[in-house]
Image (tube, rainbow, N blue to C red):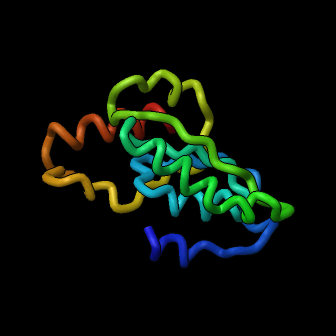
Amino acid sequence: AISLENAISFRCGGSLAGKRVLELGGGTGVLGIALGAVGAEVVITDLGDEIKHIEKNIERNTALWDMPCAQRPSVREHSWGLDTQWLADAHFDYVVGADLLYFGGWDLTAIDTREPLLRSLQASL
């Protein structure tokens, strides 16, 4: 996530300004926060236990939301492959994810993980 954050062009009015971005598996929220800082309209998702940590990190970065182009990210609980109707109803220009396999033992090549992730991705596009 840090490498992706560093790769983002931190300037207002850039190519991400006004774009709707879905972040799957937000973790700490650093990527979504960085995208919001450059003007993207971000929805950060993760499992329920992580939501309060993401919201705290958004609060800790309050100074960012005073920047002219910044968009404060919203946060939503989402388990891959479940409750995908809201993804299908929303329009996202980009879907991002970083460090998605941090939670111990998940294997992106395993059917039980891959299929729910793909259902979420397909619903959001």
* 49, above or below 58, in the image: above
Q: What residue is rendered at 76% in x and 68% in y?
A: 14
Picture coordinates of residue 43, whole percent (x, y): 58, 43
- For this orientation, the residue located farthest to the right is 68
Left-right relation of 72 to 92: right
Q: Nearer the viewer, residue 85 or 52?
A: 52
**Residue at 18% over, 50% down:** 106
Q: Nearer the viewer, residue 57 or 95?
A: 57
Q: How far from the left and from the top, in percent, is residue 103? A: 24, 52
Q: Above or below — where is 76 with respect to 57?
A: above
Find residue 35 and report its horizontal and vertical position in percent: 62, 60
Report the side of 37 relative to 76 (left or right).
Answer: right
Total count of labels: 0
Residue drawn at x 70%, y 59% as measured from the top left: 62
Residue at image point 45% right, 34% down: 77
Q: Is residue 81 left or right of residue 89?
A: left
The quadrant of the image that shows the N terminus is bottom left
The image position of residue 76, as x and y in percent, is 51, 36
